[in-house]
Image (cartoon, rainbow, N blue to C red):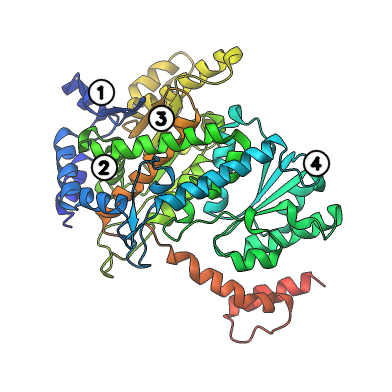
């Protein structure tokens, strides 16, 4: 795709005042916003003009996103490098959905697994499944999408969490599994091992450690009853001692970072129950319907994506800050970091040629108001422009503490306004007159200048319910999809994680001292020697 026109438009917009755009069009706020399913997305605080938006929509149409979208929902193998369909959307599809892959409808299998998983979750919650007494604690062992999705969603939906306590282990650092298991009662603990292949080295190392802990607590003959597997490798789960009735699998057309909607979401289902979990799925399905039906300018995922394209590929802003003003979304920035950077962090197009534009941005963030006392200084007065994506609920769950939520909302809206408005030298100087004079007044005033004109978007939702969380996650999934198609890349493989894993496997015996450092680069060899010396 020819990006020349977008480059030109982005360059022309660099010194454009966002405030001037509002001055020129009193209806800009209404025109540069999308409302759908109770969500409100405002992207008016950016340098994007109506002509720029028209250009972005034309690029969207030229990229054939609509056709690619329908191919995805229809089960076509759009993950071309791995020859796979991309059907995480099937995990949240309605009961009447029919989706063929290789000529066979996958939905009966999806519904069967979903019903079995939710049935098991209810058994755990009720005490019907109680291998050593009622389960009080669930430990989910996974990594990547097998961890980031569940830990984010369980925390986000804590007000609905009336089931066993959920804990999460991902890092192969022994401190993570050790510190998680300390204080738990093996007899009332259920361990979920989440690995599609049941070979992921970090997950299986932690799983074996958990099995040793459980074996000491409940006995080797009963340890298998305290395990559940989220895997498609029945042979390996059986070898581990997990009965097939407690193995919930998923197909290769569900990528890890898109998998919280299915068996990987078992910990969430145990925490909040089947009814709330189905509401979560319904929220995702509602966003799917909107994404497929709405015209581009009225389509929330499309406009979220086009705003991202405008900021990154158009104006050259390399990072994107995700700033949820909702403490329970504390893990959302990390979840979206994987979703976006693992999906669109590519340098090669579908046809194998090098990209001629930057790919996905660096995604990072922290909940407000915490971030305001950490990195907002750089955002407001630093030398780099950081587009900010704010999100906030109109209501919180703590009705008795509604004054807290009012302050939270005020801070969220104030930050986006401050980014846009800034404070010029004259304003800063006027505020300090009387306190300083002469050259010192000038110096002090310059330290209080805010450049302003900082772009941001704001997503407002009614209240963080299971349905709304489903909407938000699906919104961002589709945003990543649109940006990926427009960039001409495959958003559904992740070859970039492979090389480090391969080298880690070969370095294992070197680290333990079973092999020498011959053949390793001088830096790595020196580091290993230092580690060996400090191990005695």
State the residue at coordinates (24%, 37%). 293
Residue 306 tag number: 2
Residue wearing tag 1? 29
| 10 Å crowding of disc 3: few (<14), some (14-19), many (20+) | some
Q: How many marks on residues?
A: 4
Q: Secondary structure at mark 3?
A: helix
| 10 Å crowding of disc 1: few (<14), some (14-19), many (20+) | few
Q: Secondary structure at mark 1?
A: helix
Q: Is residue 252 visible?
A: yes
How much space separates mark 1 and mark 3, taking CA atoms? 31 Å
Q: Nearer the viewer, mark 2 or mark 3?
A: 2
State the residue at coordinates (54%, 39%). 153
How much space separates mark 2 and mark 4, taking CA atoms? 53 Å
Q: Nearer the viewer, mark 3 or mark 4?
A: 4
How much space separates mark 3 and mark 4, taking CA atoms? 66 Å
Is label 2 in contact with label 1 (beta carbons under 8 Å)?
Answer: no
| Residue 112, horizontal then vertical, whole percent | 50, 49
What quarter of the picture does the C terminus occupy? bottom right
The quadrant in which residue 422 appears is: top left
| 10 Å crowding of disc 4: few (<14), some (14-19), many (20+) | few
Residue wearing tag 3? 446
Q: Is residue 199 visible?
A: no
State the residue at coordinates (45%, 65%). 496
How much space separates mark 2 and mark 1, taking CA atoms? 17 Å
Q: Nearer the viewer, mark 2 or mark 4?
A: 4
Residue 133 tag number: 4
Is label 2 in contact with label 4 (beta carbons under 8 Å)?
Answer: no
Look at the picture and state if 163 lies above or below 532: above
Q: Earlier in the sequence, mark 1 or mark 3?
A: 1
How much space separates mark 2 and mark 3, taking CA atoms? 35 Å
State the residue at coordinates (55%, 65%). 197
């Amino acid at each position: 795709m020819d990006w020349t026109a977008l480059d030109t438009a982005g360059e022309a917009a660099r010194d454009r005042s966002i405030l001037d755009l509002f001055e020129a069009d009193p209806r800009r706020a209404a025109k540069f916003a999308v409302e759908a399913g109770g969500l409100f997305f405002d992207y008016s605080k950016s340098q994007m003009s109506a002509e720029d938006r028209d250009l972005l929509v034309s690029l969207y149409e030229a990229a054939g996103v609509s056709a690619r979208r329908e191919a995805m929902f229809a089960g076509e193998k759009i993950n071309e490098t791995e020859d796979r369909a991309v059907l995480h959307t099937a995990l949240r599809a309605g009961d009447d959905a029919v989706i063929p892959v290789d000529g066979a409808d996958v939905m009966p299998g999806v519904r069967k697994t979903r019903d079995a998983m939710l049935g098991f979750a209810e058994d755990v919650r009720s005490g019907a499944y109680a291998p050593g007494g009622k389960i009080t604690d669930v430990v989910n062992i996974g990594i990547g999408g097998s961890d980031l999705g569940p830990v984010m969603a369980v925390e986000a939906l804590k007000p609905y969490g009336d089931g066993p306590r959920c804990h999460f282990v991902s890092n192969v650092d022994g401190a993570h599994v050790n510190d998680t298991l300390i204080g738990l009662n093996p007899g009332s603990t259920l361990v979920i091992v989440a690995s599609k292949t049941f070979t992921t080295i970090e997950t299986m190392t932690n799983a074996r450690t958990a099995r040793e802990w459980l074996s000491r607590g409940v006995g080797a003959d009963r340890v298998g009853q305290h395990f559940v597997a989220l895997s498609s490798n029945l042979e390996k789960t059986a070898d581990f001692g997990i009965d097939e009735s407690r193995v919930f699998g998923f197909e290769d057309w569900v990528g890890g970072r898109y998998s919280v909607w299915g068996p990987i979401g078992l910990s969430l289902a145990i925490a909040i129950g089947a009814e709330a979990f189905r509401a979560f799925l319904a929220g995702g399905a509602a966003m799917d319907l909107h994404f497929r039906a709405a015209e581009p300018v009225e389509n929330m995922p499309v406009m979220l994506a086009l705003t991202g394209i405008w900021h990154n590929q158009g104006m050259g802003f390399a990072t994107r800050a995700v700033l949820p003003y909702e403490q329970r979304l504390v893990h959302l920035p990390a979840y979206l970091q994987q979703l976006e950077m693992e999906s669109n962090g590519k340098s090669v197009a579908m046809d194998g040629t090098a990209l001629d534009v930057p790919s996905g941005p660096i995604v990072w963030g922290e909940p407000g108001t915490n971030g305001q006392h950490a990195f907002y200084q750089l955002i407001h007065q630093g030398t780099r422009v950081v587009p900010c994506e704010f999100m906030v609920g109109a209501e919180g769950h703590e009705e008795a503490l509604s004054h807290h939520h009012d302050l939270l909302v005020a801070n969220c809206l104030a930050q986006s306004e401050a980014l846009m408005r800034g404070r010029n030298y004259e304003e800063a100087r006027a505020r300090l007159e009387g306190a300083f004079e002469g050259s010192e007044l000038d110096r002090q005033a310059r330290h209080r200048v805010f450049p302003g004109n900082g772009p941001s978007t704001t997503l407002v939702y009614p209240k963080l319910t299971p349905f709304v969380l489903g909407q938000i996650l699906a919104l961002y999934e589709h945003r990543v999809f649109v940006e990926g198609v427009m960039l001409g890349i495959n958003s559904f493989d992740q070859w970039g994680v492979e090389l480090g894993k391969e080298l880690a496997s070969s370095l294992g015996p070197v680290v333990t001292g079973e092999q020498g450092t011959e053949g390793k680069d001088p830096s790595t060899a020196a580091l290993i020697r230092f580690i060996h010396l400090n191990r005695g």
